[in-house]
Image (cartoon, coloured by chain):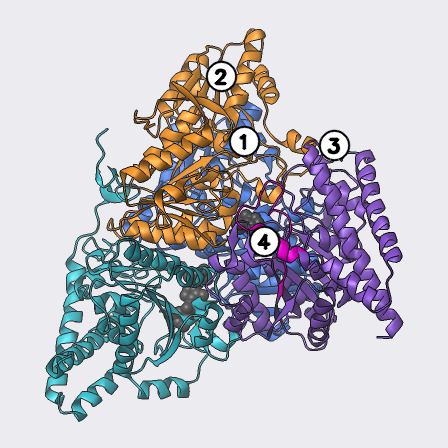
Chain colours: A blue, B orange, C purple, D cyan
Amino acid sequence: MREITYRQAVNEALIEEMERDPNVFLMGEEVAEYNGAYKISQGLLEKFGPKRVIDTPIAEAGFAGLGVGAAMVGLRPIIEFMTFSFSLVAFDQIVNNAPNMLTMSGGQFTVPIVFRGPNGPAHQLGATHSHATECWYANVPGLKVVMPATARDAKGLLKTAIRDDNPVLVLESELLYSTKGPVDDLGTEVLVPFGKAAIHREGSDVTILCYAQTVRMAMAAAETLQAKGVNAEVLDLRSIKPLDLDTILNSVSKTHRVVVAEQNRPFCGIGSELCFQIQKYIFDELDAPVARVTQEEVPMPYNEALEEAVLPSADKIVRAVLEVCPV
Amino acid sequence: MREITYRQAVNEALIEEMERDPNVFLMGEEVAEYNGAYKISQGLLEKFGPKRVIDTPIAEAGFAGLGVGAAMVGLRPIIEFMTFSFSLVAFDQIVNNAPNMLTMSGGQFTVPIVFRGPNGPAHQLGATHSHATECWYANVPGLKVVMPATARDAKGLLKTAIRDDNPVLVLESELLYSTKGPVDDLGTEVLVPFGKAAIHREGSDVTILCYAQTVRMAMAAAETLQAKGVNAEVLDLRSIKPLDLDTILNSVSKTHRVVVAEQNRPFCGIGSELCFQIQKYIFDELDAPVARVTQEEVPMPYNEALEEAVLPSADKIVRAVLEVCPV
Amino acid sequence: MHKSSVVEQELGMLSQMLLIRRFEERAAQQYQRGDRIGGFCHLYIGQEAVVAGSVAATRPDDYLITAYRDHGHALARGTSADSCMAELFGKATGCSKGLGGSMHYFDKERSMMGGHAIIGQHLPLATGFAFASKYRNEDRVTLCYMGDGAINIGAFHEALNMAGLYKLPVIFICENNFFSMGTHAHRSNPLKEIVNRGKGYDMPSVVIDGMDARAVRDGLRPIVETVRTTPQPYWVEIRTYRYRGHSMSDPGLYRTKEELDKYKDLDPIAKLAKQLTDEGTLTQEKYDAMDTEAKDIATASVKFAEESPEPPLEALYDYTFVNTVNGQPATA
Amino acid sequence: MHKSSVVEQELGMLSQMLLIRRFEERAAQQYQRGDRIGGFCHLYIGQEAVVAGSVAATRPDDYLITAYRDHGHALARGTSADSCMAELFGKATGCSKGLGGSMHYFDKERSMMGGHAIIGQHLPLATGFAFASKYRNEDRVTLCYMGDGAINIGAFHEALNMAGLYKLPVIFICENNFFSMGTHAHRSNPLKEIVNRGKGYDMPSVVIDGMDARAVRDGLRPIVETVRTTPQPYWVEIRTYRYRGHSMSDPGLYRTKEELDKYKDLDPIAKLAKQLTDEGTLTQEKYDAMDTEAKDIATASVKFAEESPEPPLEALYDYTFVNTVNGQPATA
Ligand SMILES: Cc1ncc(C[n+]2csc(CCOP(=O)(O)OP(=O)(O)O)c2C)c(N)n1
Ligand SMILES: Cc1ncc(C[n+]2csc(CCOP(=O)(O)OP(=O)(O)O)c2C)c(N)n1
Ligand SMILES: [Mg+2]
Ligand SMILES: [Mg+2]
């Protein structure tokens, strides 16, 4: 298999799906002539022309809503947010229009739309630009939320999202764009199904639940832990909604201990929900409370050291595991 | 003590605080000449004049932001959302401006603002108008979120909110506006502190955690349960953030069983977070998994029976309690 | 258009307006009973000429979208009174299967793209329909209605700006009934005239008298034809008036009886009836028959709604996601 | 104004522009080292006349707010180069204590109400300052700067509409540098001229040449005085150009070298220097001394920033909430 960047993987998914289906188009700020703020859409304008690769004004609510409308009449828009921190100004379109249309119309209108872009803290972008939005969107009935951590998942989840007839948010990660990973050769269709977690590392002592940015941290933590005699299973959720509860419960039933590592803020975060579901279904399997590594509960500071103190890290995961797994 | 409506309690809080401090003003759609869509601001225009009671265009982001700006320079705005479902179009102002200003300015600018209005499902308003927003806002560092269930708390929490120098969301409830409760006579200052839950009913078998709309359901459920031999403690959170963890943990340490009854959607809801915190701090005190009664996970249907099926109810609370408390 | 077909069209407009009015009178009665219609309910009475005239200027496959005051728009598009009333009753036979309610009427078959209840947020959707028409080289025009209160919200601005930039075939129609709930338009925007708002986008803009169905049709027809052949947006202010309160719970204290009466004297139904009568194409008898028919349809719709089944409880989970991929049943 | 004070003011404007430019040149160097300045960093080079001229037309207590391209605005208001550079370095001595970074400069004492990084969302804040001035019967004017890309977002619209409706003393200044990242203004809005946007609010509007500091000052001065005495908003398009990329990572491939050179020939610093020299109030020697001083201050600011302490880790939790009530220490 090739090793390509997460960035290229997303780019390939866009190209393949646009080639497959003329109803698919890409819209967002700087996606066309500039080739994308993070160069995700490199070459797409040239390949597909300005009809299908469309630069927008700075008007997230406007173009998100345009996408919802276009989807209602059968096109399949991919709406890029330069970052999901900017999706906050389009919140109503994402939360009130996209997922409600099917219900409100009594099933007449589907909204096959994809909202995608980098989500969560990157590096020193400050309080306004570092939002982890996954828990807000995952709360909303009618939205699917997937969060690729690897290049292959970045490609395969996006392709699945584009084909799904429901609104899907693909929350990528700026810090992962340049990371590399194995992806099937061109010509092989890469479709990663929703609702299937990936076990990146098997282990018997503790389950580390992670996704997106925290997967690499969890893998590093698992190495460190191994040296200390703790054998961690690392489970990458990939899809937040639908959630692969089976895989999670199976793993925890084996390890009896859980640490959730998330880039999210703590209060009502993804880990809160995971904890609830785990204890609901397999209360008796838990030998220790579910532990979490999250952001600290403060607006993100610009200063590098302070930012680092706010974010999850491999070290923090190690410490959290050691607290629930006495060695 | 007098019995007054929740509506009148909010109205009194506004009047008393506006009389006390000339920097306090009220702004929102139809708050002045119309006396409020739900008549919360009845009489205020007449009393305080158009300088301090201000009708706005339909521009939630605009007037929420105007409030944040006015607060930065020392006024104390109360921003009414006709319902918090309409706060979605102002999401960025509430989430990105109000709570971040203090950090981003290195402590130079405080934002003493109150956002208030009815939140959560009311009656047959459909998918767009029934949002329970508490878990989104409670996720955000720098915001305080309080949710009065009784007339006295509606008055006392709002007065405390207006005096607080941080941004506070007071999430009221349309379905509670006409309910009555005891409130101290005029002349007695009613200030309900943040971060203090209220035990509405003591019990020994199970703790029902509830807030806002679900408090009455929980009380009704507790009566039914008593008849079945289950003695439930009903704990009204009142303040979601800050959260009164001590009172919660004390109660659960006594009852060893918890049901959270919330008007929120389930995924990453308030109950998810409560569950996480309880099991984190007093894992060994729990004799059963934390159970929850929430909305069903669907966009809100208009049809009355379907809406009822989606919402929490006293019956559902009874059933949930009976599952964790085998009689 | 041939003279006889003009007459036919105008009689059609008249009976449409009558149906809307009689339907809503029945809806108001049913609402007031208290036990049948829930939630908010906003009546269109007084504004009928706007939708009757504009629908007459368009093709049935042109997209139409509006806000929550949407009963008239669905009825004008041909959605049956039965399914409209059933929707108010929350019945499975409603135009949105009882899941949408008064504010969320949809009729896909008739390109009625919904009533939408969050102010201004349907304007971007309208640009999406227009975008799709252009993308597919279809000559369908989108009609996007909104109230005078909607022109002050951000989504309005983003939609008009993008429509102008991309030259989308969408006509933005402000049904200026002078009030947004209790707020007169002069208290919600600084404009001398709402039509001026189009200037901020260098968008061609016109004002039309909305108490005159013919004026609406004739004012819109050339615009529709221009937009159909040369995609580009228009900004249209149609001046009208609502006779009832903002919603069923509004006593309307913010306006005088004189003002209301002045507009009732300009009643659009009476006006078109008089025009046709003066011209000899309508008799009192014929008018009465038309009105009786409208009343009968409206009355029958109540019965239909009453007798219709509730949506089944088991269907509760059927409308959150569709289980299809690329429009085909999901295989896995 | 007395002739000698005009000269003094203009020399002040010149040295301000020099300081901004030299400061940012140093900032760019430090950014490129890679290890000192993080996040995004947007340079103002080329646009200095806009802020120098407009600050010269206002009082120090007038509120000033802008977007993320904010270094010039703070420096023009008198925030020290030291604290500006320290902010880029994330140091405790920065104007936002190292917590804000390049995009979030604040200086309360100088009524510098912040750089704001979410496009358009600071415009409502500006209406809030202006609202407060009017509420308190203070004659402070608010200057609200934005880019040409910001005029297409909803918050822009809501802010201008409300400012017009409430007659708020706020001057909205579009620094039209023709590009929003790589998007030319003609590709982001349908307007022939950006100044037309004011017409959608019936708002008095003007265009000013932003490559000429005197033109900016003289164009704004009467507006500022009008707004100060008779609160009301204005819409001002100031045409300018940025020499550097959008941010440090942008190679600027969307424009030609010719276009860039054309504007460099119109350099605002060179222009004011030439005007003053031609009029006999500036000599080359004096200019060189001013420039040297600017460079020295900028260079010193790097040293200051280097040597300044990091914000203490323990302070991490000190800026989420204040522990005061009504501005007084909380008692309980
Ligand atoms: C974003 C948002 N804010 C507030 C409301 C509440 N609301 C519903 S209708 C209305 C007045 C709208 O007036 P207008 O646009 O003139 O339409 P009309 O009712 O006259 O048809 C308001 C404020 C809403 N639905 N959405
Ligand atoms: C709501 C939002 N969307 C997108 C961005 C990303 N962004 C930052 S600057 C910028 C371009 C702004 O251009 P303009 O307003 O002309 O200002 P200039 O950079 O020219 O000073 C964009 C798209 C943002 N910060 N906020
Ligand atoms: Mg109106
Ligand atoms: Mg620009």
Dot 3 amino acid type: Glu
Task: Please identify, in this view, whether the residue under mark 2 or under mark 1 is nearer the observer.
Answer: 1
In the image, is the residue at mark 4 within 8 Å of ligand 3 by its beta carbon?
no
Question: Which is more toward the observer, B125 or D134?
Answer: D134
Locate the N terminus of chain A by quadrant. Answer: bottom right
What is the spatial separation of the Cα atoms under label 1 and label 4, in whole angstroms? 36 Å
Instruction: Answer yes or no: is residue D29 visible.
Output: yes
Q: Secondary structure at mark 1?
A: helix
Between B140 and D60, the one nearer to me in the picture: D60
Q: Can you say whether A152 is above or below C322 in the image?
A: below
Identity of the residue drawn at 35% across and 61% down: D168
* Disc 1 and disc 4 in contact, CB within 8 angstroms: no
Left or right of B4? Residue C205 is right
Identity, as a three-letter code, of the amino acid under mark 4:
Glu
The secondary structure that most of the magenta stretch takes on is loop
Give the quarter the ligand 2 occupies: bottom left
Check if residue D13 falls in the magenta segment.
no
**Nearest the eye: D301 or C216:** C216
Q: Position of residue A268 (x, y in %)?
A: 46, 36
Under circle 4, the secondary element is helix
Residue B175's disc is 1
Q: Which residue is mark 4?
A: C258
User: Which one is closest to the eye, mark 3 or mark 4?
Assistant: 4
B240 lies above or below B93: above
Disc 2 marks a residue whose amino acid type is Arg
Image point (33%, 56%), residue name:
D131
Specify whether disc 2 shares its chain with disc 1.
yes
Give me the chain letter of mark 3: C
Callout 2 crowding tier (Cα within 10 Å): few <14, some 14–19, many ≥20: many
Question: Which residues lie in the magenta part?
Answer: C238-264
Residue named by callout 3: C314
The chain to which mark 4 is attached is C
